Amino acid sequence: MSEEKTSAWKQWKKNLGESRPWHLIDPAQRTTNDIAASRYDLCKGCEHFISATTQCTKCGCIMKAKTLLKNAECPIGKWGQDLTPSM
């Protein structure tokens, strides 16, 4: 049985989880600055992080923005929805 290849668009939408870019302008959808900073610190130490663009090669997101979103998650499980980092 062959696996169906997921399009880049579908993968990007899946990686977003419950978060959407427009949630950045809704204060109720944002996490605390401490949690965002902890998440971003984990991202900066990750092998999938591109420091020049602050982008993740796994999810394609700009991590300075994604780490601020309450319902965002790391695609490889380093941090989850509005929780402290898991590592």
Image (tube, grey):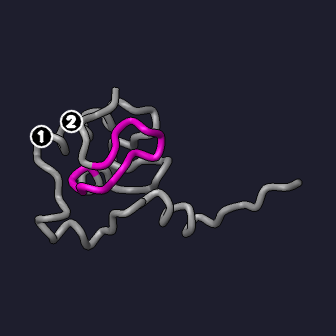
Q: Position of residue 5 (x, y in %)?
A: 72, 60
Q: Secondary structure at mark 1?
A: helix
Q: Is residue 30 magenta?
A: no
Q: Position of residue 83 (x, y in %)?
A: 25, 41
Disc 2: CA contacts within 10 A as few (<14), some (14-19) or many (>=20): some
In the figure, residue 28 lies in which quadrant? bottom left
Disc 1: CA contacts within 10 A as few (<14), some (14-19) or many (>=20): few
Is 28 situated above or below 67?
A: below
Give the side of residue 17 with respect to residue 34, left or right. right
Q: Position of residue 4 (x, y in %)?
A: 76, 61
Residue in front for this viewpoint, 27 or 50: 27
- Whether pointer 1 and pointer 2 mark residues with C-beta atoms closer than 8 Å, the reply is yes
Name which residue lies at 46% across and 46% down: 75
Question: Mark 2: which amino acid?
Answer: Ser
Q: Position of residue 53 (x, y in %)?
A: 34, 51
Q: Secondary structure at mark 2?
A: helix
Question: Mark 1: which amino acid?
Answer: Asp
Residue located beneath label 1 in the image: 34
Is 60 situated above or below 44?
A: below
Give the side of residue 8 with respect to residue 65, left or right. right
Name the image quarter holding the N terminus: bottom right
Residue in front for this viewpoint, 86 or 10: 86
Q: Which residues are magenta?
A: 67-81
Q: Is residue 69 magenta?
A: yes
Query: Could you say which disc has been placed on residue 78 in the image?
Result: none
Name which residue lies at 21% across and 36% down: 38
Query: Could you say which disc has been placed on residue 38 in the image?
Result: 2
User: Of helix, strand and loop, which mostly describes the magenta segment?
Assistant: loop
